[in-house]
Amino acid sequence: MARKRRNTYKKSNKSIYIIVEGCTEENYLKLLKLLYRKNVQIKNCNGGSAKKVLDEARKTINKYGDEYIGYVVWFDRDTYNPAKDSNLFNSLKAKNNVRIYVSSPCVENWMLAHFQKINKNEPKCDRCMAILKQKYIARYEKNDCNMLTKFINKEKINTATNNYPALKNIPKTVETNQLI
C-alpha cells in the first residue's frame, strides 16, 4: 500500500526588527532576548540623534518590507528635534507595522524604572544616570552589556513596566514576538 503524502506547511518564522539609538538600548534588548528566548533582529545606530534612528528605520523598512512581522523604533527624547524630525517621525508612525518608543529623557530613566518609581518628565539625562549610579548600579556604564545581566531579571522588568508605562510594551514585544 502506498503511503499517503501529506502536505506539510512550515509555520512562518518571522521576527520583529528593532532599530535603536545606541549600545545601551541594544544591550538591554539582547538581555530581553536571552531572558525570553526570542528571536528579534536588532539594529544599533551607534548613537547620535533621533533623526539618525528614524532615517535608518525608513531605509530598513523600505529594504525588508513585509519580511518582518513589524518594526520597533526606539530612541531618547533628548536627541529628538521636533522642528527637524517630525515629518519622518509621523510618516513612520502612520505605518501599521511600526511602533515608535521614546525614552524620556533617555534610556537611563527607563533603567532607573527597574528599581524605583521614576519621573517621566525628568529633563536631564545626567541626573537619571547619577541616581542610577549612586543608588543601584555603582559601576553603570552605557556600553557594558554584562553589567545588565547582573542587575536586571524578569522581576525587575515587571517592576519597570509598572514604573514606566510609556515603554511597557518593549519587553512584551520581545516576549511575544508581536507588535502590541
Image (cartoon, rainbow, N blue to C red):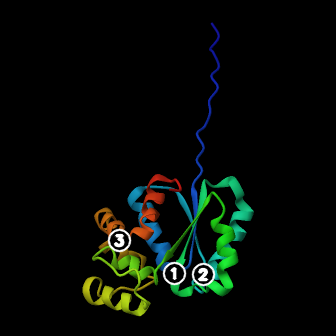
Q: Quadrant of residue 18?
A: bottom right
Q: Residue at x 47, y 55 (%)?
A: 38
Q: Earlier in the sequence, mark 3 or mark 1?
A: 1
Does label 3 or label 2 sit earlier along the sequence? 2
Can you give x and y, in whole percent of width and height, for residue 42 in the image?
A: 56, 67
The residue under label 2 is 50
29 and 69: which is toward the camera: 69
Residue under the point 69% across and 64% down: 61
- Could you say which is closer to the camera, residue 119 or residue 113? 119
Q: Residue drawn 47% across and 59% down?
A: 174
Placement of the N terminus among the 4 image quadrants: top right
Point out the tag, 1 or 2, that comes first from the N-terminus: 2
Q: Which dot, 3 or 1, sits closer to the camera? A: 1
Q: Residue type at mark 1: give it.
A: Asp
Please name the amino acid that badge 2 sits on: Ala
- Contact between labelled residues 2 and 1, with CB atoms less than 8 Å apart: yes
Could you say which disc has been placed on residue 76 in the image?
1
Q: Label 3 to label 2, Cα distance in Å?
A: 27 Å
Q: Secondary structure at mark 2?
A: helix
Percent across and percent down for residue 121 are: 41, 83
Determine which residue is flagged by label 3: 149
Gap between marks 1 and 2, in whole Å?
7 Å
Residue type highlighted by circle 3: Thr
Q: Position of residue 149 (x, y in %)?
A: 35, 71
Furthest-left residue in this view: 135
Q: Quadrant of residue 28?
A: bottom left
Q: Where is 137 relative to 34, above or below?
A: below
